[in-house]
Image: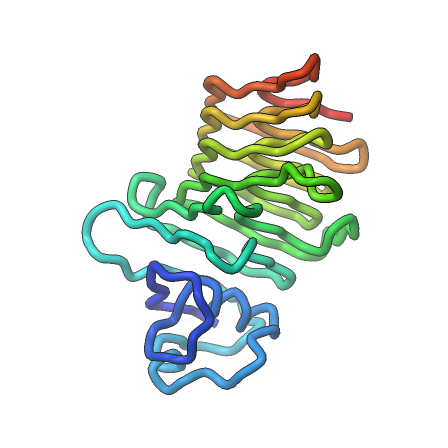
């Protein structure tokens, strides 16, 4: 299945615009309504067969600001952005940006790829949800050409990413992500049951405050 014309919105309103949140919900099987004719016209192929989300954006940098919480990905999919300078997904400092899988339920058969976008404004600092500010992973996740900037987590760590699955990160940038309250991993927190492979990435001005470890990467 290919989503050919995903636009820079995040709602699930039934209209002619296929948004990122709607596209993910279709893959997950959680939309809860039929697609409109306008939405359906922007989709080709068979659901479950190499599902991929593409973007059709106006010229210049575009931002999707999330107003309905994190984007939950529970089925295998590739999200192919147009480049970190051209598309930003902003968590609005209200919630995480992406959750891959189900919280504390490792599922390595869930294969997700995300590339060509910026993740910013992710926040996970409240009690019981204080880890993985930008992205929380419990599946098998490949990140390529993704910029994580200005995401924050609390005492359980992972300002940009908290990984409890298998993650491969390449050609990506981590800037000004942070953890508070003694949390580990201002950039990335890799749990004891997770595996992480990080290559050709740049870490700048990430912080772990309160005596915590791993301003860039922590493993515990």
Which residue is depicted at the point 63% across and 63% down? 75
Q: Nearer the viewer, residue 169 or 181?
A: 181
Q: x, y (%) of residue 43?
A: 40, 76
Which residue is depicted at the point 58% across and 72% down? 48
Q: x, y (%) of residue 102?
A: 72, 55
Q: x, y (%) of residue 71?
A: 55, 56
State the residue lying farthest toward the top. 211
Q: Nearer the viewer, residue 114 or 130?
A: 130
Q: Is residue 17 left or right of residue 186?
A: left
Which residue is depicted at the point 52% across and 65% down? 24
Quarter assignment of residue 28: bottom right
Quarter assignment of residue 30: bottom right
Q: Residue 164, relative to residue 49: is it above or below?
A: above
- Figure coloring: rainbow
Q: Is residue 87 left or right of residue 144?
A: left
Q: Is residue 61 left or right of residue 213?
A: left
Q: Is residue 124 left or right of residue 127?
A: left
Q: Nearer the viewer, residue 124 or 165?
A: 124
């Amino acid at each position: 299945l290919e989503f050919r014309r995903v636009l820079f919105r995040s709602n699930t309103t039934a209209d002619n615009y296929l948004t990122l949140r709607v596209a993910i919900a279709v893959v997950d099987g959680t939309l809860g309504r039929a697609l409109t004719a306008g939405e359906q016209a922007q989709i080709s192929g068979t659901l479950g067969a190499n599902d991929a989300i593409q973007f059709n954006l106006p010229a210049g940098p575009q931002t999707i600001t999330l107003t309905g919480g994190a984007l939950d990905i529970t089925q295998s999919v590739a999200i192919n952005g147009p480049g970190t300078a051209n598309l930003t997904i902003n968590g609005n400092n209200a919630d995480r940006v992406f959750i891959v899988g189900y919280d504390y339920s490792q599922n390595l058969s869930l294969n997700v790829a995300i590339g060509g976008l910026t993740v910013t404004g992710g926040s996970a600092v409240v009690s019981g949800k204080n880890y993985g500010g930008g992205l929380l992973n419990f599946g098998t996740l490949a990140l390529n050409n993704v910029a994580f900037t200005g995401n924050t987590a609390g005492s359980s760590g992972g300002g940009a990413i908290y990984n409890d699955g298998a993650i491969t990160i390449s050609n990506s940038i981590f800037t000004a992500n942070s953890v508070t309250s003694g949390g580990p991993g201002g950039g990335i927190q890799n749990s004891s049951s997770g595996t992480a492979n990080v290559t050709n990435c740049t870490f700048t001005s990430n912080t772990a405050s309160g005596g915590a470890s791993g301003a860039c990467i922590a493993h515990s």
